[in-house]
Image: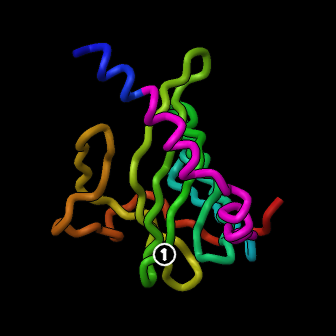
Amino acid sequence: MKKSILYLACMAVPLVYSCSGNNSEKKAAVKVDTTVSSECYVAIDALDTANLHLNTSSEGKITGHLLINYKDKGDNIGEVAGKFSGDTLFVDYTFKIGNANPTVYKNPLAFLKKDGKLILGVGQIETSVGRSYFVKGKPISFDKGRFTFAPEACK
């Protein structure tokens, strides 16, 4: 019985490869996603600072870098990726904490765009199957956020 399953699996492999044979046509259909704008922001809260660099693609996707320097805790250095929903930017923030053996975390962030500034929101986060997200039905407060990012010239 075990040998017949093994033989069937071996015969199925060539069929799978033959069905996915013409990859050049698929590659030609892929659109090039180019950066159409870049924006930089800075936020200061007492002795803590944050720098945010955002790139907007031709398809509306947002990517960039976020560095948060906490005076007492050190730096959170990482990447953001997401998109706008109305006037709110929702991103996943993948960042490292620590220098020698950094620990990698991934958390959702929400920024409200108001008067040319980005206000970092605070909301209830839940983790399921190793992924963190804002809890549906629970509001995100932009009044309680520590950082308000003001535009600055990109370096």
Say whether residue 49 is visible: no
Residue 71, how many percent across, how many down? 54, 36
Provide the residue span drawn in magenta.
10-34
Q: Residue at x 56, y 66 (%)?
A: 149
Q: Main secondary structure of the magenta part?
A: helix
Label 1 belongs to which residue?
84
Residue 68, how many percent across, how many down? 56, 46
Colour scheme in the image? rainbow
Q: Nearer the viewer, residue 22 or 32?
A: 22
Say whether residue 125 is visible: yes
Q: Secondary structure at mark 1?
A: strand
Q: Is residue 42 left or right of residue 5?
A: right
Q: Is residue 87 above or below residue 12?
A: below
> Label 1: few (<14), some or many (≥20) within 10 Å?
some
Q: Residue at x 32, y 59 (%)?
A: 122
Q: Nearer the viewer, residue 26 or 104?
A: 26
Residue 48, how many percent across, how many down? 54, 46
Residue 98 position by quadrant: top right
